[in-house]
Image (spheres, helix red, strand yellow):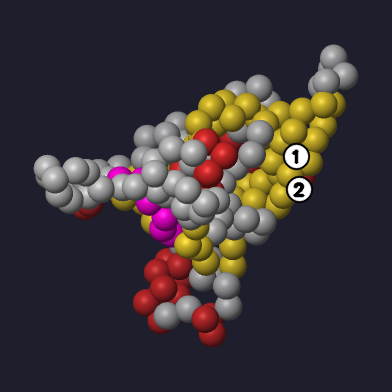
């Protein structure tokens, strides 16, 4: 499917034609350079590799510099492959935000904010001692009893417990494109997308 690499700028809100205030996320989408063209004859599948966000040669390996030089561009920080593109591109072509239209729906993928080690109340929405179940007495945010009885005398796999939260690949589907600002490479989508400000996201039709 057609897509683009972008960077999450932050959130704002706009008013629609009915005067309703709509929360939206601003994404700097592209321009991306076609850095490699995959073909069935050579690679066994068809895809376009896009590169986004320049980085200096000092911070790039010689192999990466040579790879990007074939496309006539500088080294890139983020590289992603897209299959089943609607438009045909050649090596070195620019892919811009103009491929998206206002009113259509897109999927946005990113890495969610890392929250570190969290307890069960924050991680799984446990009620705490206010809903005094699971054998809790006076520990406000404890998980309570987790083991079984004499049989099977062990804790089942997959039990909801405290642990590291966030920092995972998350895809939000069917976000409506509210506005395309082509001259500034900006895309406004309804709602929120995963990740912190200035984190990379992948937008797909």
Q: Mark 1 touching mark 2, by CB under 8 A?
A: yes
Image mark for residue 181: 1
Question: Residue 87 vs residue 153: left or right?
Answer: right
Residue 178 visible somewhere in the drawing: yes
Is residue 54 shown left or right of residue 34?
Answer: right
- Name the residue located 67 percent from the left edge and 31 percent from the top edge: 190
Please identify the residue farthest to the top as the structure is shown.
18
Q: Could you give the CA–CA distance between mark 1 and mark 2, rounded to whole angstroms? A: 6 Å
Q: Quadrant of the N terminus?
A: top left
> What kind of element bears circle 2?
helix
Find the magenta span and give its range: 159-167
Q: Is residue 43 magenta?
A: no
* Residue highlighted by disc 2: 184
- Residue drawn at the location 54% of the way across and 59% of the way down: 115
Q: Position of residue 195 (x, y in %)?
A: 58, 52
Identify which residue, 160 or 39, lies in the foreground: 160
* Residue farthest left in this picture: 151
């Amino acid at each position: 499917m057609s897509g683009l690499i972008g960077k999450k700028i932050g959130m704002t809100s706009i008013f629609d034609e009915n005067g309703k205030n709509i929360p939206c996320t601003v994404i700097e989408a592209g321009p991306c350079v076609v850095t490699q063209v995959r073909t069935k004859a050579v690679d066994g599948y068809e895809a376009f590799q896009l590169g986004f966000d320049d980085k200096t040669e000092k911070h790039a390996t010689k192999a990466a510099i040579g790879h990007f030089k074939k496309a006539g561009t500088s080294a890139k920080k983020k590289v992603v492959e897209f299959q089943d593109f609607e438009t045909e591109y050649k090596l070195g072509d620019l892919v811009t935000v103009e491929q998206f239209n206002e009113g259509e729906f897109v999927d946005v993928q990113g890495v969610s904010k890392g929250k570190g080690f969290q307890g069960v109340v924050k991680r799984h929405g446990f009620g705490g001692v206010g809903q005094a179940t699971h054998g809790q007495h006076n520990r406000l945010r404890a998980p309570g009893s987790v083991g079984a009885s004499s049989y099977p005398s062990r804790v089942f796999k997959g039990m909801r417990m405290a642990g590291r939260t966030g920092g995972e690949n998350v895809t939000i589907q069917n976000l409506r494109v509210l506005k395309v600002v082509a001259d500034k490479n900006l895309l406004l989508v309804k709602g929120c997308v995963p990740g912190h400000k200035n984190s990379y996201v992948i937008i797909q039709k």
